[in-house]
Image: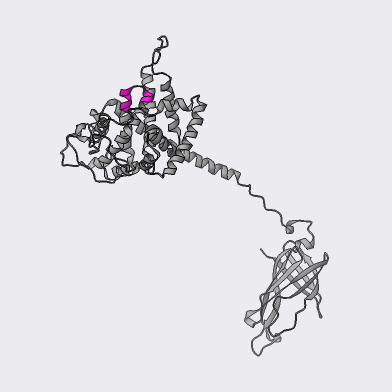
Amino acid sequence: MLDRAAHIGEPSRKKSPNRVCARSRRAFLLPDGYRGALPMSDPNAGHAARRVRFARPPDAAEPDEALLARFAERGDESAFELLVWRHAGFVRRVCESVLRDPHAAEDACQATFLVLARKAGGLRGASVAGWLHKVAQRIAVRQAARRRRAHALPNDVPAVARSDGPDADVATAVHEEIARLPERYRGAVVACLLEGLTYAEAAARLGWPLGTVAGRLSRAKELLERRLTARGIGAAAALAAVGISADVGATPRLVASILTSVATLATGQIADVSPAVRSMYQGELHAMFVTRMSRLAVAGVVIGLVAVVAVAQLPAADPPRPTVADKQSATPAELIVGRWVGAGQTVTTYPPGKGPGNGPGKEHVEQVTLEFGKDGACKMVADGIPQLKVEGRKLSGTYTFLSDSEIEIEMKPDKPKKEDSRPVEAEKRKSKVVVTKDELTLTEAGEDAPRTSTFKRAK
């Protein structure tokens, strides 16, 4: 059936039945994603009677998805033929409800299955029946519009009243709404309402649990009833217009015509395919391509807009708030808050045998960090002088401004020395204080002379 590639636009060539053309792996009709062995050419591909394996619909319980996978992965023609037997009847009726011409409906049905053969590799997880319904309805609507344009009457010629009756318009509207359903609901509607399957049969064919079929069908009926009611169509009229009829199944002649078209295109005999079928088939492939590109373009625009909106909604960067130290009128109690770094005790060492009077010595300066909080807490960390084995120390306590120029600091070591088991009392010291934006000066009264320590604001 799908034995060879159909190169659209190329003249047909005679090929040896035992030779595979190197270009065949770009087969026009092999399923998208086909990974199976490439079939050989069949010189009798045009004889439909020889290609129909089954004289009537086979009794097979294999789900549609499994049959489609067999065809897409291994090129299993019998699996594809079984799908045609299962669904060609309702596909033709969908097309006829739109086109109102049995011959045109059969052409549209053939085109639908040609598209299925082409797109089989990309339908994993989809309901085959639901997908076929949407494609058939789309092909039929497009063909109906083309026929109306081709047969448009001049303005001065009265139109002949249609004999199709109101049921035809109702059926068209119902199929439009079915095609609009989400795919998971559409599969249940097609299987149970259009193909006449029981819940159990539909579950086996769709590969869904029985409860899933019942639940999705119930939800689909609610959606359909609401949408059709909005269009002035009652539920009873809708079911009567698209209900199961005596010709619900596919006939051997219909199956044979579909397989003939597929086999003819697959062997490259494009000129032997009905022009109407070929036009509808190529038109649907083109429409699918355009739709896909449009969705990608829209997705790109949406992503771009979302990014722009997200950036626009970001809070504007607040200008850096001036710190207390930046305020010109800040008080010393406000300016002192923060971390300050300065020098602590200084020790001068001399070489052996020399003293202060025998030349300069080497100074060792301890670094001290003071931290003043807004709540009146303070900390001091002295690094010590490791070279002289002078240990560092940590003190914490509180501070209080007695005036703008005097501060009282009360601190005690965080951890007393191990050899000193007595409780350590906090030591209070009063100092003169001068604090600016970047510098802190503490002057403490000493036994001999005042001791002044200068600290810089830590960054």
- Residue 397, compared with residue 211, is above or below; it is below
Q: Is residue 24 left or right of residue 403?
A: left
Tell me, yes or no, if residue 410 can be seen here. Answer: yes
Q: Residue furthest top?
A: 156
* Residue sticking out furthest to the bottom: 353
Report the number of discs. Answer: 0
Q: Residue at coordinates 27% horizontally, 38% vertically from top-left?
A: 58
Horizontal relation, residue 372 to residue 387: left or right? right
Residue at (38, 36) in percent of width and height: 191
Colour scheme in use? one colour
Quadrant of the frame with the C terminus: bottom right
Return the x and y of residue 62 as percentages of the image width and height: 32, 43
Residue 199 sits in quarter:
top left
Determine which quarter of the picture holds residue 117: top left
Q: Is residue 281 visible?
A: no
Quadrant, the N terminus:
top left
Q: Quadrant of residue 417?
A: bottom right
Instruction: Tell me, yes or no, whether the highlighted magenta stretch contains residue 98.
Output: yes
Residue 77 among magenta residues:
no
Image location of residue 139, percent across then percent down: 37, 29
Which residue appears at 35% of the width and 43% of the height? 65
Q: Which residues are magenta?
A: 96-108
Majority secondary structure in the magenta region = helix
In the rendered image, residue 237, in percent from the top left (x then y), is placed at 45, 25
Q: Nearer the viewer, residue 198 or 54?
A: 198
Above or below — where is 240 with respect to 86? above
Which of the pair 94/272 is nearer the observer? 94
The x, y position of residue 267, in whole percent, is 22, 35
